[in-house]
Image: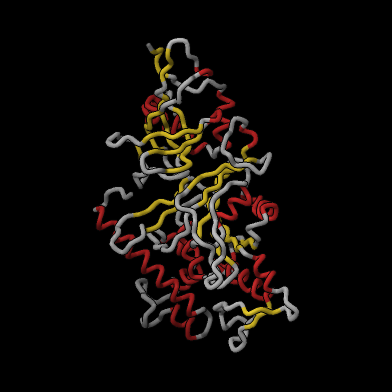
Amino acid sequence: DTKGPISSLSSSTTTIESDLEALGWQPHFSDQLSSSGKKKQRKKKQRASTEGLIPVRITEVRSKSLHVMGARGLDCLIPITQGKKIINDNAEKVAVVGDWILVEDTTTLREGESQSKLKGERTFKIHKVLNRRSVIKRRAPGYQTRKKQLMAANLNTVFVVSSCNQDFNVARLERYIAMVLETEHIEPVIILTKKDLMEMDNGDEEGEQDLNVDMDVNNENFDEEDKEFDATDALKYYQEEAGSIAGGRFSVVCLNALDGQEASALLQPWLGQGQTVAFVGSSGVGKSTLVNSICGTDVKTGDIHIDSGQGRHTTTRRQLHFLNSNSNDSSGSISNHHSVSCGIIDTPGLRELQLVDAAQGLDVVFSDFVELSHQCKFNDCTHSGEPGCAIASAVESGEIDVDRLYRWEKLVAEDAANTQDMKERFGGRKMG
């Protein structure tokens, strides 16, 4: 005894659009549902196929289901049906946190029920993954693994997090920045955490503390024969090193991850309504602590390990939280869409980051080397002894940092090898 499926959300179009925009909905996605301009004829069929479907955003991917959120407080789990064909025109044929998908409401109303007084849970069926505006990815960990791993989709900003201690590593930051820059529409921002621990180190009578940090011996602030440095100078060192990446074109924010008020204020330029940000970095650098401080969530975190300077890794899967602008609350409910300011994705710490499809990002991070290589005598110069090599000449004259040059060559070779490996495995087919 049913009255048929619920075909759409019972709300005004304006309210639904406002709710979706709070979740990160943009014209890029709405254009995929409508026909206009020169593409009208091609999109006419597409619109017919999407009519009546509901756009929702994936906030978590589980083994057998997707956790999604949508307009008017829609917040539920949708089972993944094995063998069910889902339309996905993206290069990588998987769904990831941050994706927008179209679902069909398959809930049925029994006699006497109404949409507003539905007794049971609503049910949905996945139809399509919308084309992404951006995505970050890496080669899946493991030497024998020959596939890409998507980390998050449809981001506006990626916060690359490192800590102000012996775990700080410029080469690692360059890897992350290159990964982020490979996709368009994403701004990378470097965050240096645990500033509070540096300030504590500076609290003794002499104002100095043994930091046990592998510093750049060429930096004028440090003497390699004396490993006791003023903590203020050390903090300045970290900021300068991070700020030197890609010629200083990206913002560097130094903060105490435990201070939610300070963190929110410093990161506010990137936390606007409808924006989606992600925190990435190695295990234990304070990503989950930052998410907790800013959102008021309860992501488990661990204490600092004294020997390594790292926190204990606790985040095990990627999750999209929504920050409530009216209070320190990120329960995710958007019954009042005006209270949602932005989406925040917490990701597990990466113990391994192998670049793939990152040539464009590497060209930005090492743009000075790329421009210099154009001055080489031969177009196919490998910078390993050929005559007329502009890179070699710059090394001899001391114009460029040899360590940084080595990192560039290493990352370019790694990315090329991984990208070629993927192409050979998939034989030109779409990869995912």
Q: Nearer the viewer, residue 250 or 345?
A: 345
The vertical placement of 338 against 219, above or below, is above
Count every numbered label the image shows and give the total.
Answer: 0
Position of residue 136 measured from the top left corner of the image (x, y, whole percent): 45, 53
At x 30%, y 35%, the residue is 85
At x 41%, y 60%, the residue is 358
The vertical placement of 16 against 429, above or below, is above
Q: Is residue 181 visible?
A: no
Relative side of 178 to 212, left or right: left
Position of residue 326 measured from the top left corner of the image (x, y, whole percent): 68, 39
Position of residue 383 measured from the top left corner of the image (x, y, whole percent): 39, 77
Residue farthest to the bottom, as pictured: 225
Q: Is residue 249 visible?
A: yes
Q: Nearer the viewer, residue 31 or 288?
A: 288
Q: Quadrant of residue 303?
A: bottom right
Q: Quadrant of residue 256?
A: bottom right
Q: Nearer the viewer, residue 354 or 296?
A: 296
